[in-house]
Image (spheres, rainbow, N blue to C red):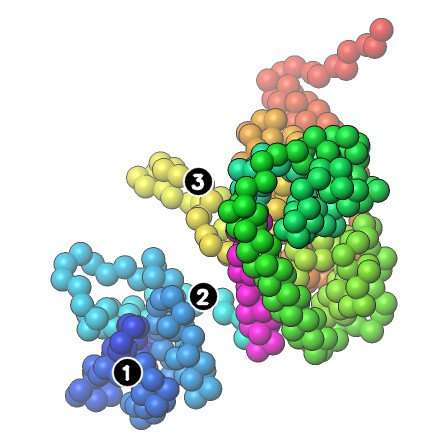
Amino acid sequence: MNPNAAGIDLGAKEHWVCVPSEATPDNIRAFGCTTPELAAMADWLISCGVTTVAMESTGVEWIPLFQILSERQLKVYLVNAKSVKTVPGRKSDIKDCQWLQQLHSYGLLAPSFVPEGEIAVLRSYLRQRENLVQSACCHVQRMQKALTQMNLQLHKVISDVTGVTGLNIIRGIISGERNPRVLARLADKRIRSSREEIVQALTGNYREEMVFILSQELSLYEFYAQQISAVESQINSCISQFSSVTEEPAPTPKKKNRRFSESEFNLHSHLYRITGVDFTAIDGLNVLTVQTIISEVGLDPSKFHSAKHFASWLGLSPGCNITGGKVKSSGTRKVINRATKAFRLAAQAVGKSHSALGAFYRRIRARLGAPKAITATAHKIARIFYTLWTTKQSYTDLGADYYEQKYRSRVINNLSKKAQSLGFALVEAEQA
């Protein structure tokens, strides 16, 4: 129970606030969205004796108010809008804030996880980088479209049109070169396609308007590449300021990332310094994946009571929808969570590896299909991540053979128990 609870309905123009009727006769007021108005709201809540506030996570309007109320030492509950649906009938901003205040006073609302401090700063930088990468990808697709319209099959002879060879050839086309053999000489020596195959791919119809579009799209792609480099510098600076958990040198990573091995900033070492765990030892997780997960879940594992709570928050645990004693649905919840996406990508990447997680993925995929195998493997990786996070232990993969042998022993043991319960004995067949 929260007798001193308030409810806030957020809006684009004004916020409606409801406090207990015992605090003041005029217990419902509207405030604007400007900073002075938000400060006045916080002062009014404190004068009414409010100690905790509940509000919906609507867009990004909640962020300024959340920060101001937190600075005033008020306990803020940011709740999921799906969890506070009101009863059918007339709906208004006033009724919404009253409903939030009533539910919160009864203790029926659970707060959402909101990272604070330097983790929130890191998350903002990483999300900005994600937005820039998505924008850059749009211009790469348009460059590819312009090349295809000129029947330049560059993507069939090189793996990446934005690599060294691809950009050199595109810049050559923009500068006015039309001879396929001259353009083919710009290819890097590591390209597997032969010189003649590249010449044939670059033989096409060099239309003036398409070359102009290609030039503009290349300029925009290079602009976004510069912006990505700038935000990555900010990310590196932000991570460097995190407090250290251990002073021990980071273990040698299993697989070296060429991008970061050539960089002066050792992301692997900094992630180990601030967490005390080498998460990249888990198959499927690389430094960028771990960086994304840390920015979403923070550095304090006590926010999640157990591995089950952690997996449930990620939306990777089976659901529980039972009505009338019948299970209506047991599927996972639909969540929009970047950490969940990172674990799913790790599960998909580990599918072809010769590891215990890879063997587990292949066994589930053969029985239930790829989508459920990805979810089950992501759930297992998340639990391993949480265990390492809380115990600070190191992860050692025992290999696919060990997993298959252990699984076979478990199946044989279950069959023996089943046969014994039916009055039979399980006998191993003699090998010829």
330 versus 312 height, above or below: above
Q: Badge 2 is on which residue? A: 112
Mark drawn on residue 393:
none
Residue interval drawn in magenta: 117-141
Quadrant (top left, top right, bottom left, bottom right) of the C terminus = top right
Q: Is residue 126 magenta?
A: yes
Single out the mark in the foreground, 3 or 1: 1
Q: Main secondary structure of the magenta part?
A: helix
- Number of other residues with Cα within 10 Å of mark 3, as a class: few under 14, some 14 to 19, many 20 or more: few
Residue under label 3, please give it: 330
- For marks 3 and 1 on the same chain, the one whose residue lies earlier in the sequence: 1
Which residue type carries mark 3?
Ser
**Image position, residue 240 (x, y; %):** 72, 75
Up-down relation of residue 71 to residue 127 (above or below)? below
Please tell me whether residue 327 is drawn above or below residue 48 in the rendered image.
Answer: above
Is the residue marked by circle 2 packed among few (<14), some (14-19), or many (20+) residues within 10 Å?
A: some
In the picture, the quarter occupied by the N terminus is bottom left
Q: Is residue 301 left or right of residue 41?
A: right
Residue type for callout 1 = Gly
Q: Residues within 10 Å of mark 1 (few under 14, many from 20)?
A: some
Q: Looking at the image, can residue 143 be seen?
A: yes
| Res. 355 image quadrant | top right
Describe residue 1's horizontal placement relative to residue 173 as left or right: left
Of callouts 2 and 3, the N-terminal one: 2
Alpha carbon separation for disc pair 3 and 1: 43 Å
Q: Is residue 315 magenta?
A: no
Task: Say left or right for 88 vs 8.
Answer: left
Could you give the CA–CA distance between mark 2 and mark 3, rounded to whole angstroms? 23 Å
* Separation of residues labelled 1 and 2 (CA atoms): 25 Å
Image location of residue 354, percent across then percent down: 77, 36
Q: Which residue is mark 1?
A: 32
